[in-house]
Image (cartoon, helix red, strand yellow):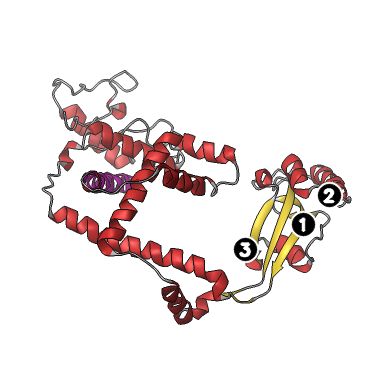
Amino acid sequence: ITAEEFNKSVKEQMGMFGGRQMPARLAQMMKKRTLDRLIDQKLIDKELAGSSITIEPKEVDAEFQKFKERFPSEDQFKSFLSRNQMSEDKMKENLTKDLKLRKLLKEKYGVAVTEKDAKDYYDKNSGRFEQEEEVHASHILIKTEKDADKATLDAAKKRAEAIAKEAKKPGTDFAKLAKEKSEGPSAPRGGDLGFFTEKRMVPAFSKVAFAMKPGEISGPVKSQFGYHIIKVIEKKKAGKIPFSEAKDKIINQLERKGFSDSMKKFIDEVHKSAKIERKEDNIKVNVKETEGGPGAPPMGGMQPQLQLNPKMKATLQQKLKAQKATPGTPSPAAPGTKADPTKIKLAPPKLGN
């Protein structure tokens, strides 16, 4: 595992933190987990390369399409790819590997779930299939700020009233109107919120939505987010979900568990048959005080950078001042100069070739 591979993996994971500060202990955990994951991946890749399993392009295309359908719009899917610095071709490459691994596990451990397995699970866990009343609704949101003054609130309400009036006209396409007018995150989906229980939404919203009939459109409803125009599409009564409705989800759930259990066995087996040499000392977490104090942005660059607390900072400064100038180790300098020890980046030695 080269430094380039390790650092690329760290960089990909950094997207999960969305620019927030990463605690030092978490960065150290990430170091170990990243290495563990890369070792596992190397071993899995070796096993897949040596297997005779093949994946047809149409299988990959079907899986790719299923993955895309998880996103409300094409733009959000592209945004996901961009955030993860991934092309569609790279994603298809990953899906191919995933499909090949699933076939390998199925071949080795016989991962298969029958309808009878699903029915047994349903009967033994009947309590899990009791559902509360649910409403399927869409909405158009006119946002207001928490500290908005009366004039601003009145103006927002007036806009919401005009939109509600337009929405109630015969022949109006509510979804299209929501895409054009709504200021909420569901706007690209035509305001569609899917099914939800009463407790899942804020009380002011739920009270109105659950009192409405399918097909009805409300006037402006005020919540802490702003003014909502609600359209109820469908309702589900409280009660037990029939097995016919739950069957596919149960099968998927049991298959995931089966693959998860098989994966653990597989990893144990490949570890036992491999010679693994870990050189964790070659991986150094960069120690860098970020500009701007505790609230400053976190790790940057290719390796984690941790913000020091005052005690650690003082200790590091003392150690740096005690060091003699040696090749690759900057000598202490006055604060604010180029070699200011509080801004020194301790980079890791390179791994591999």
Can you identify the residue that label 3 sits on? Answer: 200
* Rendered location of residue 60, percent (x, y): 42, 44
Reply above or below: 134 against 138: below
Q: Quadrant of the N terminus?
A: top left
Given contact means CB atoms under 8 Å apart, are the residues at marks 3 and 1 in contact? no
Reply above or below: 238 against 136: below
Q: Is residue 154 rendered magenta in the image?
A: no
In this picture, residue 3 sits left or right of residue 142 = left
C-alpha span from label 1 to label 2: 9 Å
Q: Report the residue at 18% width, 53% height from top.
A: 270
C-alpha span from label 2 to label 3: 25 Å
Give the residue type at disc 3. Answer: Arg
Q: Is residue 81 visible?
A: yes
Q: Is residue 31 rendered magenta in the image?
A: yes
Give the residue type at disc 2. Answer: Ala
Q: Earlier in the sequence, mark 1 or mark 2?
A: 2
Give the residue type at disc 1. Answer: Lys
C-alpha span from label 3 to label 1: 17 Å
Q: Which residues are magenta?
A: 24-46
Can you identify the residue that label 2 sits on? Answer: 167
Reply above or below: 80 against 272: above
Q: Earlier in the sequence, mark 3 or mark 1?
A: 3
SS assignment at label 2:
helix
Can you identify the residue that label 1 sits on? Answer: 231
Given contact means CB atoms under 8 Å apart, are the residues at marks 1 and 2 in contact? yes
* Rendered location of residue 62, percent (x, y): 48, 47
* Rendered location of residue 66, percent (x, y): 50, 49
Kindly indicate the quadrant of the structure image that contains residue 299.
Answer: top left
In this picture, residue 243 sits left or right of residue 86 = right
